[in-house]
Image (spheres, rainbow, N blue to C red):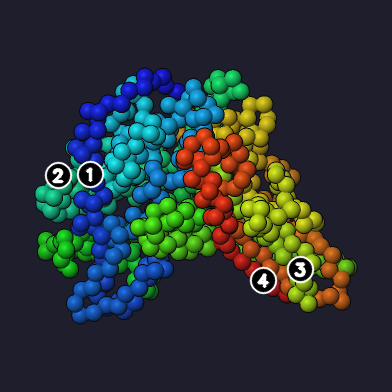
Amino acid sequence: MRILCFAIAWPIAALAQQSVQFGTFTACSVCHSNLDVPSGVTDFVNGIPDLRARAQSVPQRVAAGPGALWPASMMAHSSRDPYWRAKVRFESAANPSFGAVVEDTCLRCHAPVQQYLLRGSETPMRLDHLNPNGQEGVNCTVCHQVTTEGLGSASSFEGGFTIGPDRRIFGPHANPFAQPMVASSGFTPAFGDHVRESALCATCHTVITPILTAEGVAAGEFLEQSPYLEWLASDAAVRGQSCQSCHMPVFKDTSGVEATQHIAHRPNVAAAFPQTSPRKPFGLHSLVGGNYQMSGMLAELIPVEAALLDAQRGRVRENLRGAARLHSTARRDGSALSVAVTVANLTGHKLPTGFPSRRIWLNFTVLNHGGETVFESGRWDTRNIRIAGGNASEPHHTRITSQEQTMIYETEMEDVAGDVTSSILRAARFRKDNRILPAGFDVSRVRIDGIHASNLLPAGTAGDLDFLPGSDTVEYVFAAPEGNGPYRIRVELLYQMTHSGHLAGMDRDRSADEQVFLDLFERHAAPVPMARREFLVE
């Protein structure tokens, strides 16, 4: 986060220019909302659980184009995300001298359609300044207008992307038929394969914040979130598997073969433009991540979008289920059983990644032959909205022998004095970062001027010899007299986007945004399962 001094003033003239620099989602969706069922395909899913269709002799249109999927994504809700809004209010209140900087910097990526024109001026954008332009979130004309300038460099991070002045809309297809877009929107389609590169995503998903002392003095920088840098250090980058490969999968038929598709359709007509032909790749703009709970919160906040968000929730759940795999081995040692559980990371970044509040943990349950629970670690306590029996601060474990211990993969921040903090601006380092590394993790691959790759290394895992790139193993040891078997072992990996420890300091009486989120959290805090194993041991 660049530390700047601003004078508070709102430039009304800038608002009038918004429609010149950017377009609206509505204008794009007229021609980019539908797909045709490929010829000869009788049934297809394309990685979208709620999308099924039958091909007929007449081309059938399916609402699965960018304009049909993007509205349910977090990109569409970036400025309306209730957790983000509450967190911004908290940080601004906790660090009032930096409030304007915090809000303006966050709005670079959460409301770029409105904030971009203020860059280089002495006027910060505040959260209260949001207008309908800003509420568009990260729309089509943001990502598709980003040029290659600086991509992959430190200057591009924290929303440091560059929008070209000539209203060119970049896509992965050469020589697109331009006339319809030019006539209807004033934008010109152009070839730009950089829209398929991870460096484009990195502009908003690499965040570096100032470290503030108790006196509010800047004392360095903190790498707050770094999925792109984690990816650079992984085998996924070596294989050329970009962020888009997983989060915007290409259109495929039921056999798994990439299918061609028209990139645009005539408005309100079940046909493509006659001057065009089907092309590939065709990326599905579902933009799935791990925000399962947030989709539920948004559906409650915006009832008119509930159906879209419920469908997105299903896609997110499927995405999470493909992010990890569980393995286990068991052995008997007299009257005790020992079960080793391995969590394998199938993603190209740490698991979990992104904002520091994300966490995953193991719920390990043992039942005797009568179905009675004789040991359980990591049970979710619905009444108290917490992990049952756990501690406020849970260390990394190699061996669990008590139901009071839980294997949690997460980050824990501390300030310059070494005290635990939930404030992003007070965070100086991670005292704990045992998030599961991606396969092949090697920080020497991260060579970017101004970025210290050592900041990507785990913390709090010293001495754990099986905490390795791609997986981690934890051993559970518990009493299990032979006469009470066979024992049924259930292991579940659970994901949660945030938890009560990260909400410390939020005040429902201070702002409406904090009140709204804290109320929503009570109803949507429950974790979502990512992986599960169940087996018997004598």
What's the mark number on residue 157? Answer: none
Three-letter code, disc 4: Glu
Q: Which residue is mark 3?
A: 373
Three-letter code, disc 1: Gly
Label located before the other in sequence (3 or 1): 1
The correct choice, above or below, for 3 with respect to 170 in the image is above
Q: Residue at x 36, y 22 (%)?
A: 8
Three-letter code, disc 3: Thr
Label located before the other in sequence (2 or 3): 2
The picture places residue 414, in percent across and down from the top left corner, at 64, 33
What's the mark number on residue 534? Answer: 4
Is label 3 in a helix, a strand or a loop? Answer: strand
What's the mark number on residue 23? Answer: 1
Is label 1 in a helix, a strand or a loop? Answer: loop
Q: Residue at x 84, y 65 (%)?
A: 479
Is label 2 in a helix, a strand or a loop? Answer: loop
Residue 426 location, quadrant: top right
Q: CA distance from mark 1 to mark 4?
A: 51 Å
Q: Mark 2 touching mark 1, by CB under 8 A?
A: yes
Label located before the other in sequence (4 or 3): 3
Is label 4 in a helix, a strand or a loop? Answer: strand
Label located before the other in sequence (4 or 2): 2
Label located before the other in sequence (1 or 4): 1
The picture places residue 32, in percent across and down from the top left corner, at 24, 57
Three-letter code, disc 2: Gly
Q: Which residue is mark 2?
A: 186
Neighbours of disc 4 within 10 Å: few (<14), some (14-19), many (20+): few
Q: CA distance from mark 3 to mark 1?
A: 58 Å
Neighbours of disc 1 within 10 Å: few (<14), some (14-19), many (20+): many
The picture places residue 270, in percent across and down from the top left corner, at 17, 68
Q: CA distance from mark 4 to mark 2?
A: 57 Å
Q: Residue at x 36, y 26 (%)?
A: 124
